[in-house]
Image (spheres, rainbow, N blue to C red):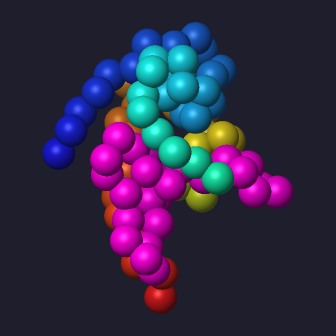
């Protein structure tokens, strides 16, 4: 597991916080927002995707909508599309 703390302004989305802090990532833009497809060299194989968990719970919001609060723990997990 890799852990990284991000410094950002209040109200900043997860995607913008990662971008502002120089996190190496790839993403795709859809009508519903940006979807992170890999972080650094870590990404899913075919038939999978990166999911976001906020404070241990699956996030219903994507990285371009989720606005973490101070002290939140954000985790990316590789999930399989079923």
Q: Main secondary structure of the magenta part?
A: strand
Rendered location of residue 60, percent (x, y)? 60, 58
Any part of residue 55 in sight: no
Question: Where 36 falls versus 48 (above or below)?
Answer: above
* Placement of the N terminus among the 4 image quadrants: top left
Residue at point 43%, 13% (across, down): 7
**Count of numbered labels shown in the rendering:** 0
17 left or right of 30 in image: left
Rendered location of residue 30, percent (x, y)? 75, 57
- Residue 17 in magenta stretch: no
Residue at point 35%, 41% (across, down): 40
Between 8 and 43, the one lying in front of the other is 43
Between 55 and 6, the one lying in front of the other is 6
- Residue 42 in magenta stretch: yes
45 left or right of 82 in image: left
As drawn, the residue found furthest toward the bottom would be 82
Residue at point 37%, 57% (across, down): 43
Between 82 and 23, the one lying in front of the other is 23
As drawn, the residue found furthest toward the left would be 1
Any part of residue 16 in sight: yes
As drawn, the residue found furthest toward the right would be 31
Rendered location of residue 16, percent (x, y)? 60, 27
- Residue 55 appears in which quarter of the rendering? top left
Residue at point 60%, 15% (across, down): 10
Question: Where 66 falls versus 31 (above or below)?
Answer: above
- Residue 65 appears in which quarter of the rendering? top right
> For the magenta stretch, what is the residue range?
29-58
70 left or right of 10 in image: left
Rendered location of residue 18, percent (x, y)? 49, 28
Question: Where 43 falls versus 68 (above or below)?
Answer: below
């Amino acid at each position: 597991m890799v852990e990284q703390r991000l410094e950002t302004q209040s109200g900043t989305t997860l995607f913008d916080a990662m971008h502002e802090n120089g996190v190496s990532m790839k993403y795709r833009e859809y009508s519903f927002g940006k979807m992170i497809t890999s972080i650094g060299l870590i990404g899913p194989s075919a038939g999978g995707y990166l999911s976001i968990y906020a404070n241990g719970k699956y996030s219903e919001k994507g990285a371009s909508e989720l606005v973490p609060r101070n002290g939140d723990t954000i985790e990316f997990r590789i999930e399989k599309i079923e």
